[in-house]
Image (cartoon, rainbow, N blue to C red):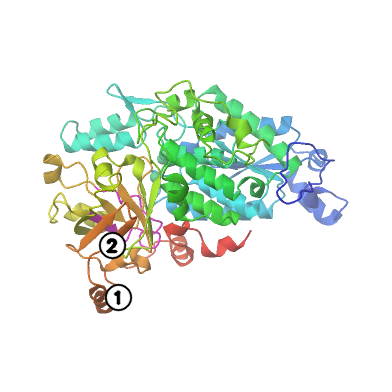
């Protein structure tokens, strides 16, 4: 092992032949009887005793792709190149599956799987003989689940993203994952297409293997894995179908063997500085609101102190540089060709917005990796001084409705922004009556008939980690048809759940504590006045405290759904999981570091 004084960074120098933890399983000098036991079974598919006892690092490959997980399924191919890289660099590869996590088809929500997959991966990495691990990431929750486990176990680890799909086109227009779904539904509601045409229209957005090709949660989380230093520089944005993707798989396989030799661990890379870099990068790329939950969860498992306020403090004033849907016009193929994340980070580095000396997986610093990698395509990646939007990060809100919530500001329309965020001379906070919905079914049932005008604030409750369970992506709500016809494009939405990373809705999300955890959302009633003051970062119920106390006394369960769980895991999840404001992690898991 490397002997480092505090603050000293491990670099790529080779040490005298390290002794790996796997030797405790396979080195017959230690405990011949047990070793015989361990060795014999790994011979049964063709590995030799010589390989197992070679003293080479044993490298895990976490396979997150399967027939159930189409976004990550191309990893079945890529893993072959990862193996070749591992073998070339002198390691031995062991591929194994992760509990599948598919964002689009998992009921009730894939968010339930993040912590479950995390838990199982920690067991596998701890319980077997691995010396390092390649995390095959991609679809939304696969990336945080893998990084959370790598943080807890703290063994050499590196991410390989599956990569985004190629550009889709529907009826001549760029069709981005997620965004084309919202468009297709709208066209059908307007009667422009029927339901068969809608399926075709939406499916044109899915032309190849890979994950969502917009800056949704998948592209975001993999960009942030790279910003954290946990993936090779420039790797996150390579489209799944490009040859560079397979070549990157090979390079990643080679690099993990070196990382095992250097004993370069997640705790050397995912420092407080690295997390601040991720927050800054997220604002510049127009990243998903879900990033705040996942990045804080990874930090919790790494033992790094990170709060939701930090997203406002370090991220809010960063401009939007990346012109990709849902906040921009293009898709990930253009983003990749324009230089991907290194080009974005080169701009941020020039402005002193990054910790340039943070160490990354390739053994170099952020500054060494990204300096002068500026984009040549300024339509897609803008210079810092000429951004798509100033002040594009998240705002963090508190008040008497919740202790913590966030809002992604780069998708707020110009008029919303003028009114609520960029005119300090007129801090006339927005106040209006609320229409309260208990989950998406209630919303669909009552939207047309509920008293809603252009000042109404739409509230969605009982969709948080405990209420749903898992926290649903449903807070962004559409105004009723009669307002749409009058040209009212959007209303303020607030809720204790989440919204899709591909949604461009200006919503106040992740209200914690949620209604089901005793937050005041539970006693909010239709018609109550709410004041939203984004400048002061507050949301308050304009109802007297005594009245709120009376409501709590009168019906302590007011607004609650019966918390009935459909599976054992749902029940365990509800008992053991925290709120969105603290990353929705398993309480008990964070003490294992
Ligand atoms: Fe899997 Fe978007 S649904 S990446
Ligand atoms: Mg999603």
10 Å crowding of disc 1: few (<14), some (14-19), many (20+): some
The answer to whether 509 appears left or right of 39 in the picture is: left
Where is residue 447? Give x, y as percent: 17, 52
Q: In terms of image quadrants, where is residue 332?
A: top left
Residue 438 tag number: none
Q: Secondary structure at mark 1?
A: loop
- Find residue 540 and name its label: 2
Is the stretch drawn in magenta largely helix, strand or loop?
Answer: loop
User: Which mark is on residue 556?
Assistant: 1
Q: Residues within 10 Å of mark 2 (few under 14, many from 20)?
A: some
Based on the picture, tell me whether residue 67 belongs to the magenta stretch.
no
Residue drawn 65% across and 50% down?
A: 267
Q: Nearer the viewer, residue 508 or 428?
A: 428
Query: Above or below — where is 61 with respect to 109?
Result: above
Query: Closer to the camera, 423 or 483?
Result: 423
Which image quadrant shows ligand 2? top left
**440 is higher (above) or lower (below) than 254:** below
Residue 425 in sight in this render = yes
Q: Residue at x 26, y 35 (%)?
A: 183
């Amino acid at each position: 092992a490397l002997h480092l004084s505090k603050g000293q960074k491990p670099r790529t120098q080779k040490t005298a032949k390290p002794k790996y933890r796997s030797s405790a399983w396979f080195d017959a000098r230690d405990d011949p009887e047990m070793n015989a036991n361990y060795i014999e079974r790994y011979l049964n598919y063709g590995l030799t005793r010589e390989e197992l006892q070679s003293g080479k690092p044993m490298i895990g490959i976490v396979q997150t792709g399967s027939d159930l997980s189409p976004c990550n399924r191309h990893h079945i191919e890529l893993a072959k190149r990862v193996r070749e890289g591992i073998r070339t660099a002198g390691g031995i590869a062991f591929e194994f599956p992760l509990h599948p996590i598919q964002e689009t088809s998992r009921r009730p929500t894939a968010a339930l799987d993040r912590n479950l997959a995390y838990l199982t991966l920690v067991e596998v990495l701890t319980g077997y003989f691995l010396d390092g691990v390649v995390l095959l990431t991609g679809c939304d929750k696969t990336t945080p689940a893998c990084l959370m486990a790598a943080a807890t176990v703290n063994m050499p680890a590196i991410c390989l993203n599956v990569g985004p799909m190629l550009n889709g086109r529907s009826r001549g227009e760029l069709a981005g994952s997620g965004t084309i779904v919202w468009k297709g539904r709208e066209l059908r509601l307007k009667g422009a297409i029927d339901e068969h045409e809608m399926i075709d229209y939406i499916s044109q957005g899915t032309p190849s293997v890979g994950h969502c090709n917009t800056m949704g949660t998948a592209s975001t989380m993999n960009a942030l894995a790279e910003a954290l230093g946990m993936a090779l520089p420039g790797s996150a944005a390579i489209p799944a179908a490009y040859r560079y993707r397979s070549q990157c798989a090979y390079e990643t396989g080679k690099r993990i063997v070196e990382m095992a030799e250097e004993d370069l661990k997640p705790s050397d890379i995912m420092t407080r500085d690295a997390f601040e870099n991720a927050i800054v990068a997220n604002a510049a790329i127009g990243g998903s609101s879900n990033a705040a939950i996942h990045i804080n969860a990874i930090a919790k498992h790494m033992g790094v102190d990170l709060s939701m306020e930090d997203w406002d403090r370090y991220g809010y004033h960063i401009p939007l540089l990346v012109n990709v849907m849902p906040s921009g016009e293009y898709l990930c193929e253009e983003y990749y060709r324009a230089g991907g994340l290194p080009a974005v980070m080169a701009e941020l580095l020039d402005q002193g917005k990054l910790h340039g000396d943070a160490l990354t997986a390739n053994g170099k610093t952020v500054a060494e990796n990204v300096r002068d990698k500026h984009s040549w395509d300024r339509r897609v990646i803008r210079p810092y001084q000429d951004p798509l939007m100033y002040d594009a990060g998240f705002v963090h809100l508190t008040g008497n409705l919740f202790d913590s919530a966030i809002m992604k500001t780069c998708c707020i329309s110009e008029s919303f922004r003028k009114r609520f965020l960029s005119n300090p001379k007129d801090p006339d906070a927005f106040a209006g009556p609320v229409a309260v919905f208990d989950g998406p079914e209630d919303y669909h049932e009552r939207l047309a008939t509920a008293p809603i005008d252009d000042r109404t604030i739409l509230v969605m409750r009982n969709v948080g980690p405990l209420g749903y369970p898992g926290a649903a992506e449903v807070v962004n709500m559409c105004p009723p048809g009669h307002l749409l016809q009058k040209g009212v494009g959007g209303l303020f939405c607030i809720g204790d759940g989440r919204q899709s990373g591909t949604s461009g809705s200006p919503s106040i999300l992740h209200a914690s504590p949620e209604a089901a955890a005793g937050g005041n959302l539970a006693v909010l009633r239709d018609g109550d006045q709410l004041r939203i003051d984004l400048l002061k970062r507050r949301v308050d119920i304009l109802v007297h405290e005594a009245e709120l106390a009376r409501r709590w006394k009168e019906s302590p369960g007011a607004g609650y759904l019966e918390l009935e769980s459909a599976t054992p895991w749902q029940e365990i999840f509800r008992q053991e999981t925290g709120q969105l404001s603290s990353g929705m992690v398993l309480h008990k898991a964070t003490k294992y570091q």
